[in-house]
Image: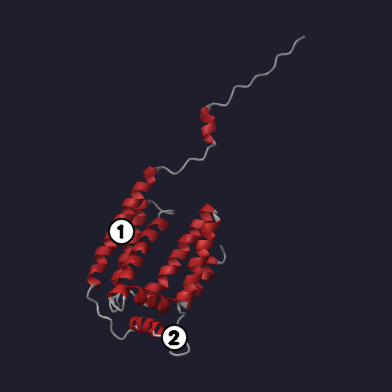
């Protein structure tokens, strides 16, 4: 008695496609980019009122002066008193050396940092919430942050205290999602820069990221 060989139908193209990873649709990226662009424009319009802000003898003037002193050859912690880690004065040193001794330079640099913060913030929040709620939350956050600065120019220690911690949190979130080694290195880099910029926010950033 002969036996018939069993034949199985070849898997259809539909079943093969079900197991293939698909990239995120571009339809979800376009609204995010649009919301990001609108938020950046809002931030740009909000900071225009700071174009004629004075730089009095405040916390911010000290650090600009510290950058001038380092550029003149003096050593921080030895030749003059410095009560924070050296990254912010070194940043002012770099800006003065590159663009000249003009107070508008750190102001423009701070505007660029705030625009970057706005873009990172809405991209980060939109991972957990719908885009509309994310846009409202990010816009409200940036508005409260910008309009609460009544006595300082934009380029100040408070700006520095949140810049790298926010970038570190966003990079850590990206690392946990993608598991790519480069994103873990980026999160560690931003966390280290947070500690070199301001000790309190730096320690808090590292303490928050350590469990992850």
Crowding at mark 2 (Cα within 10 Å: few <14, some 14-19, many 20+): some
Q: Name the residue rendered at 34%, 47% in the picture.
A: 30
CA–CA distance in space, label 1 to label 2: 36 Å
Return the residue found at the far right.
1
Looking at the picture, tell me which residue is in the foreground, 209 or 75: 75
Q: Secondary structure at mark 2?
A: loop
Q: Name the residue rendered at 54%, 32% in the picture.
A: 16
Q: From the viewer's perspective, tell me whether residue 33 is left or right of residue 192.
A: left
Counting from the top left corner in percent of width and height, residue 169 is at: 47, 63
Instruction: Say whether residue 148 is visible.
Output: no
Quadrant of the snapshot with the C terminus: bottom right
Counting from the top left corner in percent of width and height, residue 85 is at: 47, 79
Q: From the viewer's perspective, tell me whether residue 71 is left or right of residue 192.
A: left
Q: Name the residue rendered at 32%, 84% in the picture.
A: 58
Counting from the top left corner in percent of width and height, residue 89 is at: 41, 79
In this rendering, the label closer to the viewer, 1 or 2: 2
Looking at the picture, the colour scheme in use is secondary structure
Counting from the top left corner in percent of width and height, residue 108 is at: 30, 70
Q: Earlier in the sequence, mark 1 or mark 2?
A: 1
Above or below 94: residue 40: above
Looking at the picture, tell me which residue is in the foreground, 2 or 137: 2
The image's mark for residue 39 is 1
Return the residue found at the far bottom.
79
Location of mark 2 (residue): 82
Q: Name the residue rendered at 54%, 36% in the picture.
A: 19
Crowding at mark 1 (Cα within 10 Å: few <14, some 14-19, many 20+): many
Quadrant of the snapshot with the N terminus: top right
Q: Which of the 4 quarters of the picture holds residue 91?
A: bottom left
Q: From the viewer's perspective, tell me whether residue 61 is left or right of residue 183.
A: left
């Amino acid at each position: 008695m002969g036996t018939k060989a069993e034949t199985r139908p070849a898997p259809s193209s539909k079943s093969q496609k079900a197991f293939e990873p698909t990239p995120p649709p571009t339809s979800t990226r376009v609204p995010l980019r649009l919301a990001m662009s609108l938020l950046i424009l809002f931030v740009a319009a909000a900071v225009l009122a700071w174009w004629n802000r004075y730089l009095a003898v405040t916390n911010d003037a000290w650090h600009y002066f510290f950058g001038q002193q380092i550029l003149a050859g003096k050593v921080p912690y030895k030749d003059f008193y410095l009560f924070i880690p050296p990254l912010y004065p070194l940043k002012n040193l770099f800006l003065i050396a590159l663009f000249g001794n003009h107070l508008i330079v750190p102001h423009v640099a701070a505007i660029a940092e705030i625009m970057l913060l706005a873009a990172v913030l809405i991209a980060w929040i939109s991972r957990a919430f719908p885009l509309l709620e994310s846009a409202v939350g990010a816009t409200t956050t940036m508005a409260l942050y910008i309009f609460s600065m009544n006595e300082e120019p934009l380029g100040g220690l408070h700006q520095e205290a949140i810049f790298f911690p926010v970038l570190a949190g966003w990079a850590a979130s990206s690392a946990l999602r993608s598991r790519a080694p480069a994103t873990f290195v980026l999160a560690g880099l931003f966390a280290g820069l947070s500690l070199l910029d301001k000790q309190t926010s730096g320690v808090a950033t590292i303490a928050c990221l350590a469990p992850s």
